[in-house]
Image (cartoon, grey):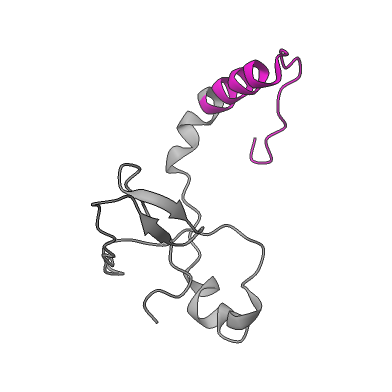
Amino acid sequence: MQGAYAKCFHSTRAVKTLHNHSALSAVAGASRRTKWVPKNLAKLHHYRKDCVAELREVCQEKYKNETVEDKTLWKYREEVVKRTERALGILNGTRLEKQLTLPWV
């Protein structure tokens, strides 16, 4: 069903209020438009341990059978972790002394 469990992008110039899945209102003069991306052009990535209760009956057949482990971005993981630690240290006003423990390393 189109729209169920959808994810979205928003123009920060046009949106006044948001819900986590849609725009609720637009700033004066801006339009609220919804454009659906065809399933063959995009894939929804949602990282959770299990499907929501409403989808549990069809979860394995419709979603879990399509699980693919994509390690393409792993080549950037060390740099991303280093920069994340630096940013968190700045935000917390401290330096992070210990390295994050990465489950995939």
Determine whether 9 is above or below 54 in the image: above
Residue found at x 58% / y 27%: 81
Q: Is residue 4 left or right of residue 86?
A: left
Instruction: Measuring from the top left, give residue 50's x and y in whole percent.
Output: 65, 69
Q: Nearer the viewer, residue 31 or 22?
A: 31
Residue found at x 69% / y 41%: 103
Residue bounds of the magenta highlight: 80-105
Instruction: Measuring from the top left, give residue 61's x and y in whole percent.
Output: 52, 82
Determine whether 94 is above or below 65 in the image: above
Determine whether 80 is above or below 57 in the image: above
Residue found at x 51% / y 23%: 79
Q: Is residue 85 left or right of residue 77?
A: right
Please identify the residue farthest to the front as the structure is shown: 28
Instruction: Measuring from the top left, give residue 66's x and y in whole percent.
Output: 47, 70
Q: Quadrant of the N terminus?
A: bottom left
Magenta span contains residue 85 = yes
Which of the 4 image quadrants contains residue 42? bottom left
Please identify the residue farthest to the bottom as the structure is shown: 57
Q: Nearer the viewer, residue 43 or 64?
A: 43
Residue found at x 30% / y 48%: 14
Q: Is residue 52 left or right of residue 70?
A: right
Determine whether 95 is above or below 23 in the image: above
Q: Quadrant of the C terminus?
A: top right
Which of the 4 image quadrants contains residue 97? top right
